Amino acid sequence: MSDHEIEFAAESPWSGGGSPFAMNSKKFGMWLFIISDSLTFSALLISYAWVRLATPEWPRPFEIWPAIAKSTLMTVFLLSSSLTMVLGVAAAHKGDRKKAVRYILLTMLGGLAFVILHATEWMHLIQVEHVTPWSNPWHVPLFGGAFFGLTGMHMLHVTIGVIYLGIVAWGHAKGKFSSEDVEVSGLYWHFVDLVWMFIFPMVYLLSVNLKG
Amino acid sequence: MSAHAAVADGHGAGSTKLFSWVWAWLMLLTAVEVFLAYERINVTLMFVILVGLSLIKSALIISYFMHLRFERLSLFLILIPAMVFCICMMLIMFFPDSVRLLQMRGH
């Protein structure tokens, strides 16, 4: 969309202007996707909260090391990657392609660190604590399904996000993708960060091992 | 002319300093959450406190990182109230039952 069109739409948003939100359709599409995806996660988190609060004997398996230390570090990685993404988008809008791509690569690094740490945390639960989606040593069958379902769904989003950012970084470096495209991928990345802001306290912090 | 300036502002809004501050606040709230996790509080109250802090964090992320604060009001109005309404409907269905179960168990 040209600047002129955006200007026209911004002047008369409700009088037949083509773009009452003064943004391109990709960005608006991403916003709509984020809203629908947030409802998916809401449903998952609310049903998890339901069983968590209704089950007094819900296990509290998360020790300071490794679970809480790792998940806190993962939160730091994800929050920091959101900051580098924001700076990448700002650089892209200023037309500084090199800087933008460097920031996107940093963001991907944060995302990768998150996935790797999360995978080791999963392996610890599976191999040392013997938790699977179907069984666990604490005789609360829903624990495994709730834990792996929620964190797995989020990890899938992070993994897709890293791949998506990789494609955008490559396209932006080549000049194929505009700064708007970088901004749209940024929206997705911040959303993934936002979802973790709920999963981390509700799954991990609500079940810390107080004895340990 | 002023409308065009507003659109241009929409892209440039928010400085590195502002974003760093938002990041610092998000880190601080995370630290508070981890600290609270080790306080011996009733689990329902703990849940409410943690979700409350998470809502503040997500509001920060949506407003500044996702830029919604600098977009037109029409975008906010078409996206957020409908989402909040849907989430409230889910809450209405789930939580009375969850509390009822707790009372039946005598906890």
Image (cartoon, rainbow, N blue to C red):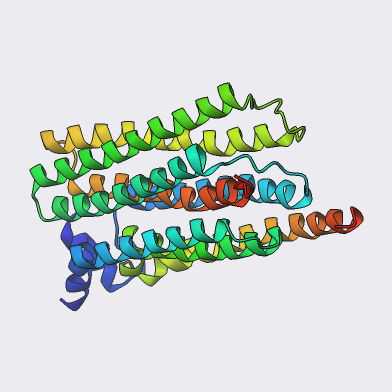
A161 lies above or below B1: above
Q: What residue do we see at 71% from left, 26% from top?
A: A135
Comparing B91 with A197, the one in front is A197
Residue sitting at the far bottom: B2
Horizontal side of B16 relative to B92 (left or right) equals left
* Residue A14 makes an appearance in the image: no
- Residue A6 is situated, as x and y percent measured from the top left of the image, at 23, 62
Residue drawn at the location 24% of the way across and 50% of the way down:
A84
Residue B104 is at least partly visible in this image: yes
> Which corner quadrant of the image does residue A177 belong to?
top left
Considering only vertical position in the picture, is B85 above or below A115?
A: below
Q: Quadrant of the C terminus of chain A?
A: top right
- Asked which quadrant contains residue B99, the reply is bottom right
Residue closest to the eye, A24 or B88: B88
Q: Position of residue B20 (x, y in %)?
A: 25, 62
How many labels were placed on the picture?
Answer: 0
Asked which quadrant contains residue B23, the reply is bottom left
Q: Residue at x 24, y 66 (%)?
A: B10
- Name the side, left or right, on which A50 lies relative to A67: right
Rendering coords of residue A65 (x, y %): 49, 39
Q: Residue at x 74, y 46 (%)?
A: A51
The image shows residue A133 at horizontal and vertical percentages of 65, 27
In this rendering, position of residue A61 left or right of residue A92: right
Residue lying at the far top in this picture: please name it.
A127
- Left or right of residue A44, residue B106 in this image: right
